[in-house]
């Protein structure tokens, strides 16, 4: 992506970016859940993911495999809010996965469009189309019904997931603006995000008491091949997810990233009932998840129609945004 370029990507590139983000996002939810079932120190896990990202990009740059501009202090200061919102989103999401099963986690994350609509209304963007409003309400009702039938209800986990919703909305908007206005590539955004994140995360793992216990447990599990495999997979997928998320948001828009996030949740919800365990089936829970999923699909269709009916713009805006990992 050329700096500040107004050239639109081809339909194939746009589709590829969206599909890549959807697959990576769905896979990451299950991988993180699998890791956290054996290693509960979520902040240390996130720190390792960011360190791996920064080191890989640095190695690629030194080896000539990637073209990344030198880090610029002015740009870094502008991207600091992106990094803070990103890490807050992932940290709260990882914390929620400790106590929330995957279907309910995905259902809760689908509340992001509701938060976006409320934020848009108060920021003076006016009322959204009726179909969009109804689909968001439908999605929210599904979450409430599913929660009533969730035998594994965990107040802390639910609170963490809802907090993650707020931070995810904020960073997607900022990523889109940063990519479009500053002409930064996906890899450059990843590098800035990783470098800015590490000091903040190190402070958190020390301040929250994860360190040094988290490292002791990590070394203690070093002899377990299954754990090492899933941990390495988590680190690799963290890099892939970051890249595809930034790529999709820049090439398409924050709106497209939101829609992809909603649609990938359909497959994740289904798989969540049969993989990794932790789901106690109840009629209310299943009914709520079905309503929530239908609302997510309806929302995606309504936003697609809204975008389709608008005059085509060279650079997309963040008119409506939303949903992870």
Image (cartoon, rainbow, N blue to C red):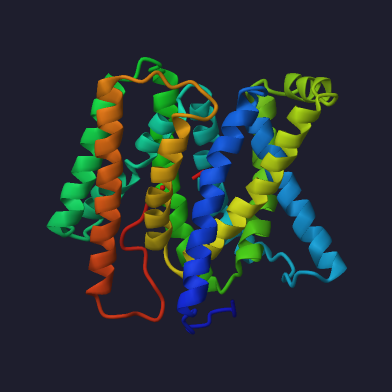
Residue 202: give x, y in percent of width and height.
Answer: 70, 35
The quadrant in which residue 77 appears is: bottom right
Residue at 78% x, 32% y: name it: 228
* Farthest residue, direction top: 151
In the picture, measured across the screen, residue 92 lies left or right of residue 185, that is left
Q: Nearer the viewer, residue 229 or 120?
A: 229
Q: Note whether residue 199 is visible.
A: no
Considering only vertical position in the picture, is 70 above or below 139? Answer: below
Q: Position of residue 313 (x, y in %)?
A: 35, 79
- Kindly indicate the quadrant of the structure image that contains residue 267: top left
Q: Looking at this view, is 41 or 177 the one in front?
A: 41
Residue 240's spot in the image, x, y percent?
64, 53
Outermost residue to the front: 274
201 vs 61: above or below: above
Q: Is residue 2 left or right of residue 172?
A: right
Specify whether residue 218 is in view. yes
Left or right of 117? Residue 44 is: right
The percent coordinates of residue 4 (x first, y second) are 53, 79
């Amino acid at each position: 992506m050329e700096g500040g370029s107004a050239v639109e990507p081809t339909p194939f590139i746009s589709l590829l970016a969206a599909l890549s983000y959807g697959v990576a996002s769905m896979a990451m939810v299950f991988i993180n859940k699998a890791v956290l079932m054996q290693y509960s120190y979520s902040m240390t896990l996130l720190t390792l993911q960011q360190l791996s990202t920064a080191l890989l990009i640095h190695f690629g740059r030194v080896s000539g495999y990637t073209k990344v501009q030198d880090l610029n202090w002015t740009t870094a200061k502008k991207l600091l809010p992106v990094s803070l919102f990103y890490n807050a989103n992932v940290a709260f999401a990882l914390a929620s996965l400790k106590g929330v099963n995957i279907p309910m986690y995905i259902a809760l994350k689908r509340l992001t469009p509701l938060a976006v609509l409320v934020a848009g209304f108060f920021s003076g963007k006016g009322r959204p189309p009726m179909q969009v409003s109804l689909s968001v309400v439908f999605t929210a009702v599904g979450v409430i019904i599913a929660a009533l039938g969730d035998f594994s209800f965990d107040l802390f986990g639910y609170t963490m997931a809802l907090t993650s919703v707020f931070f995810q909305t904020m960073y997607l908007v900022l990523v889109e603006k940063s990519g479009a206005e500053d002409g930064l590539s996906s890899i450059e955004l990843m590098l800035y995000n990783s470098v800015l994140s590490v000091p903040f995360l190190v402070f958190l793992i020390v301040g929250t008491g994860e360190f040094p216990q988290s490292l002791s447990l990590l070394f203690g599990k070093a002899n377990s091949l299954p754990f090492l495999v899933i941990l390495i997979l988590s680190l690799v997928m963290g890099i892939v997810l970051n890249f595809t998320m930034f790529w999709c948001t820049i090439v398409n828009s924050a709106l497209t990233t939101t829609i992809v996030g909603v649609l990938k949740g359909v497959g994740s919800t289904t798989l969540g009932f049969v993989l990794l365990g932790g789901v106690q089936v109840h009629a209310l829970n299943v009914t709520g998840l079905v309503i929530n999923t239908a609302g997510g699909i309806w929302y995606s269709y309504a936003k697609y129609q809204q975008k389709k009916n608008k005059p085509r713009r060279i650079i997309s805006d963040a008119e409506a945004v939303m949903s992870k990992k």
